[in-house]
Image (tube, helix red, strand yellow):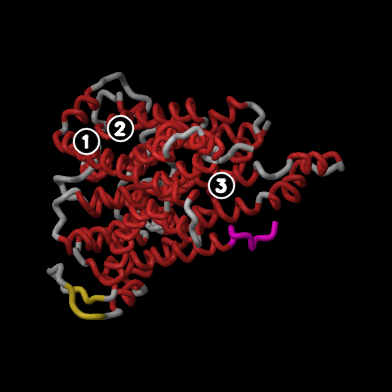
Amino acid sequence: MIGRAAVVLLVLFMTLPTVVVVAVSFNPTAIMSFPPAGLSLRWYANALGYPQFQRAAVNSLIVTAAASAIALLVGTAAALALERARLRGRHVWATALLSPLVVPGVAAGLGFLILAAGLGLLRSRLVLIAAHVALVLPFVVRSVWVSVKNLDPTLERAAASLGATPWRTFRRVTLPLLRPGLFAALLFAVIVSANEFVVSLFVSSRLTEILPVAMFTYVVNYTDPTIAALSSLFIAATLALVWIADRFFGLAAVFLLDR
Amino acid sequence: MRLLLLPSLGVIAILAVALGALFQYSVLAFVPGSLQTGGFTLANFRSVVSPQYLGSVWDTVVLSLATTALTLVVSYPVAYALARSTSAAVRSALLVLTLAPFFTGAIVRTYAWILVLGNTVVTWPVPMLFTERGVLVGLVHFSMPTMILLLAAAISHVDPALERAAASLGATPARVFRRVTLPLSMPGVVSGSLVVFAWTLSAFPTPELLGGGKVKMIANVVKDLALDSFNWPGAAAFAMVALALTLGLLGGLGRLAAGRVER
């Protein structure tokens, strides 16, 4: 009983900030109170009408779409090679591909900033997109690799023995069987890229900055609940994505928690 | 088939070049008022341990240790429930609630803690926002999902029959936990602690926003030097220290995971 109460309390602790953000976003006044004194959508209007957020939202869309698409292609190819190719030191290659996970954000961020300055690309989105591809790649490789591992090779051999060309086998057998893994990979890529903050802070200018960076600047300078409204929209979108993921693949499977 | 690996290695190579540039800057002299650099020097690394910055390094280590210990204690019960619940609905709910903050992004989460710690919800008896206490709360909250997932994976590998056997032989629940469950879940405890400690060492948004400029961890010093003072060589030295610490710790973890831990 005590154990169960502790778990409930701890889960409440984990969800408390989210609840507070959503509640505050409907606050009618700029002075925040909890619970809110009334209901108002003015901060949502403010968030959606703020020009810098609009510009940052467009940047976010461009960067996340480009980085996720590139990472999905590159990462899927890598996952197939890791599982299927005759490789020496498979472990070493895998470690290299997962290595962006362990590089501190400020180290990667400053490194990319110095690189961008050296290449004269400080005002372009190219380095930002390249950085996002690198940061997202480990998530794609892992999700797809698990799917490739679980794929029954006899199905592909059956297709080949019935006369399908390698390309046709890939398109009609391999790819459809990998679809859940590919979808999970894309989901991860989009969520990680859309929320990436530290590296993006270093390599973006006022013109190229993505939403998390614009939100950070706003939080530092203003105290009204506009960010609460924008955060609530972010939380709603993320929860929807996580719910969809759980619905279609089971999150337990994605995180390899199944017994 | 092997060629399919090439594009991804290209991506990793870009990251490697960026980190190479970082290393190069860390050993070049800073020319104040300019982004041009001078010749080879070790002065940037000497300033990491100078009295001006040693406080930040010390704060970083202390806060990281405290965060790791606290996170371990508060994550274990949730991880245990997650691994052992027989109801699929409870497991699913726990997992979604655990992962939701994981996916919510650093800025949204940290902003939420500004509201909670800033006397919006309750009035705190002691100041919380812009203190190390507040930063610690934010860091623990930030680390919990990772720790819970790693612990739950380890706990789910502990055979419940062993716990039942201990209990049937008369061990109290506390003793079963101390002598059976905890020792057998040690791999998760070790890997969770190492990952959380390494990540906290280079934490940035949490101390930046919850510390309000009063609490400076290594990453905040990097940002101040790089983006406010335009001292890229000085910032690069701090970033290299963070990188070396993280890689050292997680490299050690990799070796542990490779099977040198006795279970």
Q: Is residue B240 above or below residue B70?
A: below
Chain where mark 1 sits: A
Q: Measure the alpha-carbon separation of dots 3 and 1.
A: 34 Å
**Could you tell whether B137 is left or right of B8 in the image?**
right
Q: Position of residue B26 (x, y in %)?
A: 29, 71
Could you give the CA–CA distance between mark 2 and mark 1, rounded to whole angstroms? 16 Å
* Residue B150: assigned label: 3
- Taking the image as shown, residue B94 lies to the left or right of residue A236, namely right
Viewer-proximal residue, A184 or B181?
A: A184
Distance of label 3 from label 2 (alpha carbons): 31 Å
Q: Amino acid at mark 3?
A: Leu
Q: Position of residue B196 (x, y in %)?
A: 49, 53
Residue B85 placement: quadrant: top right
Circle 3 — which element?
Answer: helix
Are the residues under badges 2 and 1 in a single subunit?
yes
Q: Residues within 10 Å of mark 1 (few under 14, many from 20)?
A: some
Q: Which residues are magenta?
A: B256-263
Q: Is residue A259 magenta?
A: no
Asked whether residue B110 appears in the rendered view, the answer is yes
Image quarter where the C terminus of chain B lies is bottom right
Give x and y (percent) for residue B240: 35, 67
| Amino acid, disc 1 | Ala
Q: Are marks 3 and 2 in contact (CB under 8 Å)?
A: no
Q: Quadrant of residue A72?
A: top left
Write the residue at 46% across / 57% down.
A95
Chain containing mark 2: A
Q: Chain of mark 3?
A: B
**In the foreground, B71 or B119:** B71
- In the rendered structure, does residue B258 fall within the stretch colored magenta? yes
Residue at 39% x, 27% y: name it: A240
User: What amino acid is at disc 2?
Assistant: Ala
Please, what secondary structure does the residue beneath circle 2 have? helix
